[in-house]
Image (cartoon, coloured by chain):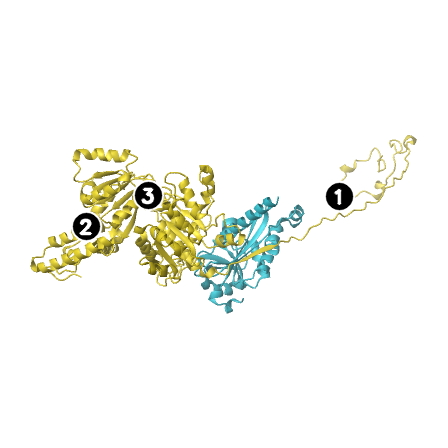
Chain colours: A cyan, B yellow
Amino acid sequence: MPANQLEKKDATIAYFTVVDDERTGWTGGLLVLDRGGRPLEFQCTLPVRPTRAHEILFGPTLRAHLVGEVIGRVLLSKCRTPLALVCCDQPEGLTIESYTQSPVVLVREAAEADEGPITNDMLAESECVDVAGSSFLVPMERLADVQSLAAFYNDLPDAVEPFERIREAIKEAHSQLSRQSAEAA
Amino acid sequence: MSFFSPRPANSKPLSSKPLSSKPAMSDLTAEIDTANSWITSPVLEPHVCKLAMSAIEPVSIPIRLPKLMTATRGFLFPDAARWIPPRDPEASPSSRVGKEKPKLGSGRKHNRIKPPSDIVKLQDRLYYLLQPPLDLLVGSGQLNFPFNPFPYQLDGMAFLFPRYAGILADEMGLGKTMQAISTIRLLLCSGEVRSVLMVCPKPLVTNWLREFSVWAPEIPIAAIEGSSAKREFQWRSPQIPVKVANYELLMRDQSILTDDSMHFDLVVLDEAQRIKNRTSTTSHVVRSIPRTRSWALTGTPVENCPDDLVGIFEFLSPGYLKPGMPMPQIAKQAGDYILRRTKDMVLDDMPPKLYRDAQLDLTPEQWSTYESAEKEGVLYLENLEQSLTIQHVFELVLRLKQICNFDPVTGSSCKLERLVADIEEVAASGKKAIVFSQWVKSLEKIRDALQPFGPLEYHGKIPQKKRNTIIDQFKEDPNSHVILMSYGAGSVGLNLQFCEYVFLFDRWWNPAIEDQAINRAHRLGAKGAVTVTKMMAMGTIEQRINDVLDQKREMFDTLFSSSGDTPARNVGLSREEIFGLFDLRAPCGKKVA
């Protein structure tokens, strides 16, 4: 939905992250919140396990392929709630902008927890916008959109914490899956 | 073999030629030196052989690289917006000025709602897991409380919120009441529950009403009381989402409660140890109430034996625990249903002194005596006119305060009822308490009521030489859980740090004296926080004195808030304020309202 047509009450915010676990594989989660931080929708993938051939042939591009083109794409396509803004905590996640009309941003504080300091040369042509007390790194071409949305999220309790919720939810889903497999066995 | 023709003997070697001179073409003619070459030898006659080799043909082996794909699962939470109580526009500005920024990786623990193990469906489990942590909601101003809850209290709310069966078993003084009320408030606002029944001992009914008005002022609540017809109307009234009833009343109204049309979304039992005996009538009646969720609040879930817990579980989840089960099995099965914190466990969250106001309503007998005594007393004072002195007013105040302690005719006492219930919990937890009163006579009546808890006395009537023995006995005797002290005798020169509870049965004029008394238990080096319960009869002279002192404290706190320790503690009542307690005009001064 174009930012300039959005009403405050419709200002949803989606959080997207991918968890890489040696045992289970790569699992993605997309959590859609209202502007107060309450959950509206949660989509998660089943774990993806790339083969050794994928690892060799994709080489260092495998991670970006999995995060953006495989997991991010399918999650966005399944999401039923209209999104106003999509947040990532992994730089590779920014590539999902190809599959949504909403601006996709990198939440600096969340990304730095894993990636270390995010510098300007790592994300060329991006600008920083302060949203709900955190720094959102936004591609130049979507800067105006994100700036116009920022004020809608003043009630968001914390702009970083929802990533933790996704990880907790994925952990929960995994444990239920493994319980079910154990019971089936 | 030489590829060059032999040079004449007198010729100079090539290397000795000047670099600039170029050799002539004839010098470079290649010839075979037949004398020295082996190639011409017939012994080594060369033959040419042909070796056949097949062409190398590469073979391609395909490696299948399947497209990476995954399936998804989706969950919608349509009711999200209704979860939080309506915001108080004055108390919750949406401005983020001064708001603490999140610090990832700093190990900050959030008060997150976690689904209990008996919620199985993934959708339901995720609904709770994906809610924002309570501490963030409080910090952002979305969730408002009159006072900031301690982190462990938010944990308690996060524990109760998703539970259909649960025991909040915090030690006395940690705020079980507040945690239960705040969680009920969240559940009502979310629409998850619509009708709640709160069951408590009779002396605590007014306390629950009062606490609800503090922590959930927007929730309509009523105590079930009065005639049979009135009670039936109250039981069936859908306009009141929270009903408070005492245990005895449930037995009288059992037929209404077990009616097919009656159903509660949540039933909460306060002092749930009352149903530890599974065969008691109280237990039967409570268990027969049709309900969806069942919570129990108690500071002493186990008083004598593990079967006490089995009794409480018969209400929560009948048949889940069985009498005679081995202790480890009970502990394992019950673990997910019980949250118990002691003061030691949450010490970092707590202030060294925790004040609880026990605001009580006089018993009907006390009220009757009190009202006539006040009416007659004020009339008498007014008639004194110019001969009225502050001493006269003091006499009336003292008389009324004594009635607030005990009705002189019947001996009835709302404070004693409450004290007995609290000391029961203190004793069951193996702890010790000090009870202060201004009057030895009151202490003697308290002593008689607290006999099961080994009360000792320490006041003006106890000879000096016996006092040390009494203190030693109180320290050493595990069956002695309470010592009764007068403010005068017990306020100075004693160290009773092993006591974690202090009860002020009546209030002293000057907060400084109360503080000295409290500090018997709270000294540097005290092993845990001290809970101070100040008993006060509401709507009486005690409340009026308290209000005046509170106002003065507030004024001093405002004036001296930056200087740390304020002198407010030394504030007593002035002459005008004492006259003002009865709306009287001081003989030589203006009327003080």
Q: In this view, does B198 lie to the left or right of A107?
A: left
Look at the numbered disc 2 and give the secondary structure of its residue: loop
Which residue is denoted by mark 3 in the rendering?
B425
Image coordinates of residue B400 in percent, x first then y, are: 18, 53
Type of amino acid at the residue the image marks with label 2? Val
Which residue is denoted by mark 1 in the rendering?
B20
Q: Is residue A54 left or right of residue B260?
A: right
Which residue is denoted by mark 2 in the rendering?
B409
* Mark 1 or mark 2: whose residue is earlier in sequence: 1
Do callouts 1 and 2 mark residues in contact (Cβ within 8 Å)? no
Do callouts 1 and 3 mark residues in contact (Cβ within 8 Å)? no
The quarter of the picture where residue B575 lies is: bottom left
Disc 1 with disc 3 on a shared chain: yes
Which image quarter is the C terminus of chain A in?
A: top right
Q: Nearer the viewer, mark 2 or mark 3?
A: 2
Number of residues whose C-alpha sits closer than 10 Å to that of mark 3, classed few (under 14), some (14–19) or many (20 or more): many
Q: Mark 3 lies on which chain?
A: B
Q: Residue at 47%, 60% (x, y): give it.
A: B80
Look at the numbered disc 3 and give the secondary structure of its residue: helix
Type of amino acid at the residue the image marks with label 1? Ser
* B273 vs B484, nearest the viewer: B273
Q: How far apart are marks 1 and 2 (CA)?
A: 145 Å
Do callouts 2 and 3 mark residues in contact (Cβ within 8 Å)? no
Disc 1 with disc 2 on a shared chain: yes
Q: Nearer the viewer, mark 1 or mark 3?
A: 3
Q: Is residue B181 left or right of residue A54?
A: left
Image coordinates of residue B75 in percent, x first then y, are: 54, 57
Q: Distance between the residues labelled 1 and 3?
A: 120 Å
